[in-house]
Amino acid sequence: MKFLKKHSFKLKVLLVSVVFLTVLILTGSHTTTLAQQKTLLKNIALAATQDTTQDTETEEEEEETVAPPSRPLTIIIDGQETTSDQPIIIKGTRIYVPLRFVSEALGYPIKWDNSTKTAYIGARYVGTDLVDKKPARTGVKIKQPAKVGGVGYPKGYILGPSAFHEVSWDLGGRFNHFTFNFGVPDNNQTDTAGFTVVADGRKKLGEKVISKDDGLKEFSFGAKGVNTVTVKSYKQAGGVVVSPRAQ
């Protein structure tokens, strides 16, 4: 079929030429007037011009038109197959896939901020970095990416069941909000973990217990006028504080 489409112009010209010769043979070249021969040749030229235009337009349309795939896009990650419920789009040598599908297939949470038209993949990071820019006063940094739900997170602090069960920062009363992500590590001995957030050593800002099934979750607390903020492991059940920041 591709051969016929590509060479349709040549085939049609050949067909018209054959008809022209057949007419000459049947009627006798001596009986066909010069005017009739010119008319037939003119028709052949006209057909050629029309076909050339049509073929050119068809080729241009084929280059610009993107046909839908015969099946949804399939991605295999670590031997696990996952399929998108949205069709793949191919333009030239580029492949376009839904951002949420790719993010979730890789195990990263994704959030959309409509006010700023921004997509956040993984731990959302907005504000002053409390790992590298303003490290914690007490606490143990994550040395190897902590895995939560199969995803490794490299920036943050460990809340262990041992002596390393809290982490604290000096905020100096300069921020309005304290935000971080919290999760139960995959290698945690318990399926649940929790934390307690305390301001200036005495005021409890919040407390939460989550399970491994919850994955990594974001929490934010008001910190206006707070000089020191501390995150303590709830009943020393472990957990990880990922990408803490102050705003």
Image: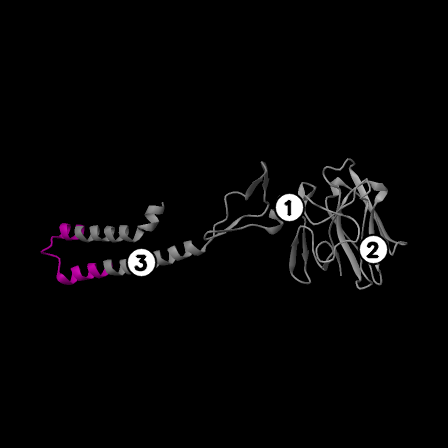
What amino acid type should be assigned to the residue bearing mark 1? Glu
The three-letter code of the residue at mark 2 reads Val
Colouring scheme, one of rainbow, by chain, secondary structure, one colour: one colour
Q: Which residue is mark 2?
A: 229
Q: Main secondary structure of the magenta part?
A: helix
Considering the numbered disc 2 on the image, is that residue within a helix, a strand or a loop?
strand
**Upstream in sequence: badge 2 or badge 3:** 3
The amino acid marked with disc number 3 is: Thr
Q: Closer to us: mark 2 or mark 3? A: 2
Q: Nearer the viewer, mark 1 or mark 3?
A: 1
- 37 is within the stretch colored magenta: yes
Q: Is residue 105 magenta?
A: no
In-image side of 107 versus 22 (left or right): right
On the picture, is 17 further left or further right than 171?
Answer: left
Alpha carbons under labels 2 and 1: distance apart: 32 Å
Span colored in magenta? 22-43
Which numbered circle lies on residue 104?
Answer: 1
Residue displayed at 62% across by 44% down: 105
Tell me if residue 237 comes above or below residue 31 in the rendering. above
Report which quarter residue 247 is drawn in. Answer: bottom right
Q: CA distance from mark 1 to mark 3?
A: 49 Å
